[in-house]
Image (cartoon, rainbow, N blue to C red):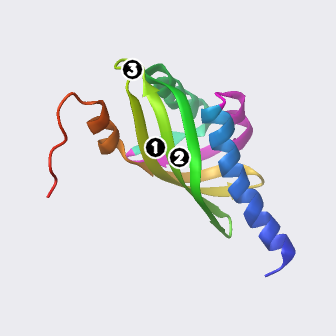
């Protein structure tokens, strides 16, 4: 593998890590339009988010419910034009004041330094259980 291929792969991983750091941890909304391509698509579970403007609405909805985001990369991998980051998040639920911990995985296709396609899955059920007043049900 050539040194330029390694550099390109590392750049893609760093771009995804930069996204989490600037957009979520620092609350820098301007980074969304810088990195999310105008025709980019994010598949977040069953939700499809198209372009920076739709992502900003999604972002604003989450920011209205949660604060104090701290997203940390656990593992970053890259191959070809794809970068994958498994992450751990901590945030505060504004309505209850509870601190929540969530894990997730984001896979991003990068073209010319921008996100053109992404798939994201995170533990929404675990988050709901943490915010519930009910004890967690046994799954098995």
Q: Is residue 114 above or below residue 84?
A: above
Q: Earlier in the sequence, mark 3 or mark 1?
A: 1
Element class at badge 2:
strand
Place of residue 78 in the rendered image (x, y in percent of width and height, measured from the top left): 65, 66
Give the residue at x 44% y 48%. 103
Look at mark 1 in the image and give the residue it sits on. Answer: 48
> Whole-percent x and y of residue 94?
42, 19
Q: Residue at x 34, y 38 (%)?
A: 127
Q: Position of residue 40 (x, y in %)?
A: 61, 46
Q: Residue furthest bottom?
A: 1
User: Mark number for residue 42?
Assistant: 2
* Marks 2 and 3 close (CB-CB < 8 Å): no
Q: Secondary structure at mark 3?
A: loop
Locate residue 35: give its quadrant. Answer: top right
Q: Label 2 neighbourhood size at 10 Å, few (<14), some (14-19), many (20+)? A: many
33 vs 65, left or right, is right
Q: Which residue is rendered at x = 37% and y = 26% of the image?
A: 98
Specify start and end residues of the magenta stretch as a single range: 26-46
Local SS, label 1: strand
């Amino acid at each position: 593998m050539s040194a330029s291929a390694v550099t390109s792969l590392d750049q893609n991983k760093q771009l995804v890590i930069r996204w989490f750091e600037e957009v979520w941890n620092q609350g820098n909304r301007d980074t969304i339009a810088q990195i999310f391509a105008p025709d980019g698509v994010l598949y977040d579970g069953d939700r499809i988010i198209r372009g920076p403007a739709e992502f900003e609405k999604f972002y604003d909805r989450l920011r209205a419910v949660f604060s104090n985001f701290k997203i940390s990369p656990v593992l970053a991998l890259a191959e070809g034009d794809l970068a994958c980051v498994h992450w751990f998040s901590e945030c505060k639920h504004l309505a209850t004041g509870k601190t929540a911990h969530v894990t997730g995985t984001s896979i991003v296709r990068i073209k010319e330094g921008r996100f053109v396609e992404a798939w994201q899955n995170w533990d929404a059920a675990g988050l709901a259980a943490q915010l519930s007043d009910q004890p967690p049900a046994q799954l098995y």
